[in-house]
Amino acid sequence: MLYRVFLSICLLFGFATANLNQQTTVLKNVKEDSATIDIGNLSIGQTGVIIHNFDESKSIITADFEVVTTSLNQSTVKFTYIDYDNTVAIPYPKISVKNGDTAILNHMYNTSFIVAPDFESFDLVNKNFSSQNFLHSDLFGAYLKTINQPVPSQKDFTNFCKINNIGTIFFIIEGFVYVVDSKSFAILEEYKVKKEISNNTFMTPFYTNIEDIKLGLFSFGENSISSYNNYYSKLLGL
């Protein structure tokens, strides 16, 4: 019991922190694909969305953006227009990003899921970050099973998060918790956990109750992850 309490206390000390609360501001100095916002001290790779307001009651998301430079009081963002999947032939207005448009930083960052090697690590993070809306990792496991991919790539993560409006992923690797932006895959926060994770005692591809995630019959690639720590460290560029 004392050991578990010690783990929980250690988990709360962050080595690299960013303000991950949603913040709203306006765009300035809009150019072809960049603009500035009056929020500084951000992490490179933080993301958000740009909203065009028609009036007080009508608005539409027109673009995603990513922080590319930051200073004390201001940051530069690069934006890309959203390509909506139009399966019902509803016309979508093509609206250019303009000065004065609303920028929402850290959009959907409070919705996440956890990539952990075992239940103990999964449960520890889930309980300590009580303000997060964690979707269960079984959802991602089921997604990987439907696409016949037992070794998830960065593209698999980003596609799944886009479908389910997930803003951040919590990876537990070698005693650290890494909070990762689901779009840019930038590491936003790090937390130290006083817990050694053995490469020989992990679930594959991560903690999930979904079983038999197998490579497709005509697919190429690895059938399983041989070293949890090594694989996800490489995936995050650690």
Image (cartoon, grey):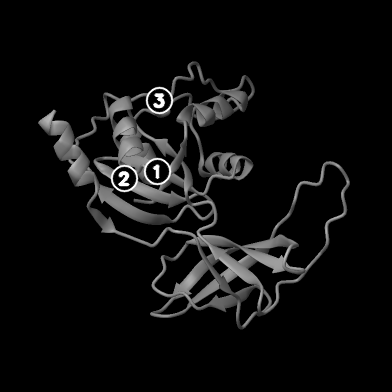
Vertical placement of 36 versus 117: above or below?
below
Residue type marked 2: Val
- The mark found on residue 177 in the picture is 2
The residues bearing labels 1 and 2 have C-alpha atoms spaced at a distance of 6 Å
Q: Position of residue 54 (x, y in %)?
A: 77, 68
Q: Residue furthest top?
A: 212
Q: How packed is label 2: few (under 14 Cα within 10 Å), some, or many (20 or more)? A: many
**Along the horizontal axis of the image, is 213 left or right of 164?**
left
**Screen quadrant of the N terminus:** top left
Residue at image position (52%, 75%) is 76
Q: Residue furthest bottom?
A: 29
Q: Position of residue 200 (x, y in %)?
A: 26, 24
Q: Nearer the viewer, residue 198 or 165?
A: 165
- Determine the secondary structure under disc 1: strand
- The mark found on residue 204 in the picture is 3
Residue type marked 1: Phe
Residue at image position (83%, 56%) is 92
Q: Nearer the viewer, residue 65 or 153?
A: 65
Residue at image position (32%, 31%) is 123
Q: How packed is label 3: few (under 14 Cα within 10 Å), some, or many (20 or more)? A: many
**Along the horizontal axis of the image, is 4 left or right of 38?**
left
Q: How packed is label 1: few (under 14 Cα within 10 Å), some, or many (20 or more)? A: many
